Image: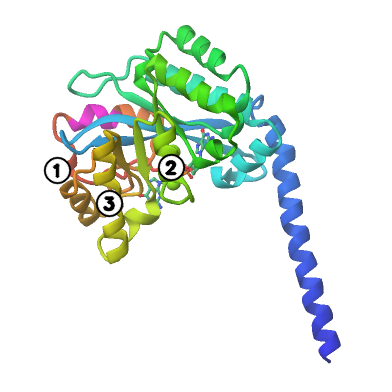
Amino acid sequence: QAKEGGKDSYRLFTSEMNDSVQRRLRLEYHLVWALSRGEFSVVYQPLYDLKTNRISGAEALLRWNNDELGAVPPSEFIPIAEQSNLIYEIGKFVLDTAMNDFSELKNREGDLLHLAVNISPQQVRQSHFVEDFMATLEKQGFAPNRLELEVTEGLLLSNQPNVKEMLHKLHDLGTELSMDDFGTGYSSLSYLLQFPFDALKIDREFVDGITDVELNEALATAVISMAQGLKIKTVAEGVETEEQLEMLKSKGCDLAQGYYLSRPLDIDGLKTLLGEMGGESLKDGKNTKKAK
Ligand code: C2E
Ligand code: MG
Ligand code: MG
Ligand code: MG
């Protein structure tokens, strides 16, 4: 009997493995064609300036919709795109599309909106990344200081000498650099000091418990005051409740994004939101229209 049980669980294990390997292969197969078949789109999640209560920018987030697979979340396909080197062309598509959508986009106060774009380590490691980036800016007539590039620790971990040089080049153009998912890696703090970051994004994990887990509140307080000392902006991600928002404001956090403020929207949804909001914004609270 024991033998049989063992055999069964072995069988179960391999069939689960096969499932995940097969899923991966299917994704990879479809991903190769996704760009040329126009299956990607970009949505934008507003970033609220907590000092002025206004939308000052938005983060571009990639979406993939395939006939056979349906909507595949970025957390599933981005790692595959990175491993198969498709990320370079895909990353270009995101930058191109987002700059095009944002070229004239202003908030109600008439300020041009900032655009935050996630960049994979693999993209930046390409020797011509900066040149390509500058060419895209030029082509789109887009001011470099309207852009914020969000990078994760993974990039800095690679420890390649040219990564530091490239980040400095980008920063010298006036483009802002944000450290994404701050607090989830091992060395976020030491990297903040070593590289020219303008902002850090407090990961959702810490924002989530901020009102009921003492340690998370203490961490958020420490991170915000440390950033202030370093003259780095703080952005809270994943704000889902009014309580979280108020707590972050009281601690001096500069910017916030999250479902409580707005879901990611397609470009038309974003334009509608900007038009509707008038001078108000945070006080009107929630906007969950056209959720993507
Ligand atoms: P991220 O850069 O940390 O982006 C924030 C993620 O949190 C987004 O997930 C967003 O939809 C989600 N989010 C925002 N507010 C809330 C909230 O209040 N509650 C919850 N539960 N979630 C919230 P998304 O769009 O699924 O993207 C996941 C990750 O995929 C991103 O994390 C980013 O690392 C990566 N990604 C997305 N688009 C791109 C891209 O164009 N290029 C690259 N390289 N990576 C991308
Ligand atoms: Mg991001
Ligand atoms: Mg993030
Ligand atoms: Mg995150």
Residue, x 25% and y 61% (percent of image)? 211
The nearer-to-camera label among 3 and 2 is 2
Which sits earlier in the primary sequence, circle 2 or circle 1? 2
Q: Which residues, given as a range, are shown in magenta? A: 272-277
Any part of residue 292 in sight: no
The nearer-to-camera label among 1 and 3 is 3
Q: Are marks 3 and 2 in contact (CB under 8 Å)?
A: no
Residue, x 65% and y 45% (percent of image)? 69
**Left or right of residue 184, residue 7 in this image:** right
Label 2 packing within 10 angstroms: few (<14), some (14-19), many (20+) = few
Which sits earlier in the primary sequence, circle 1 or circle 3? 3
Residue, x 39% and y 49% (percent of image)? 203
CA gap, disc 1 and disc 3: 27 Å
Element carrying mark 2: helix
Residue wearing tag 3: 222
Looking at numbered disc 1 in the image, what kind of residue is underneath it? Lys
CA gap, disc 2 and disc 1: 37 Å
Q: Quadrant of residue 158?
A: top right
Q: Which one is nearer the viewer's eye here, 244 or 69?
A: 244
Which sits earlier in the primary sequence, circle 3 or circle 2? 2
Give the main secondary structure, helix, strand or loop, of the magenta stretch: helix
Residue wearing tag 2: 190
Q: Are marks 1 and 3 in contact (CB under 8 Å)?
A: no
Q: Which one is nearer the viewer's eye here, 194 or 253?
A: 194
Looking at numbered disc 2 in the image, what kind of residue is underneath it? Ser
Residue, x 30% and y 48% (percent of image)? 223
Residue wearing tag 1: 283
Q: Quadrant of residue 71?
A: top right
Looking at numbered disc 3 in the image, what kind of residue is underneath it? Ala
Element carrying mark 3: helix
Q: Residue 37: percent from the left, percent from the top?
A: 65, 27
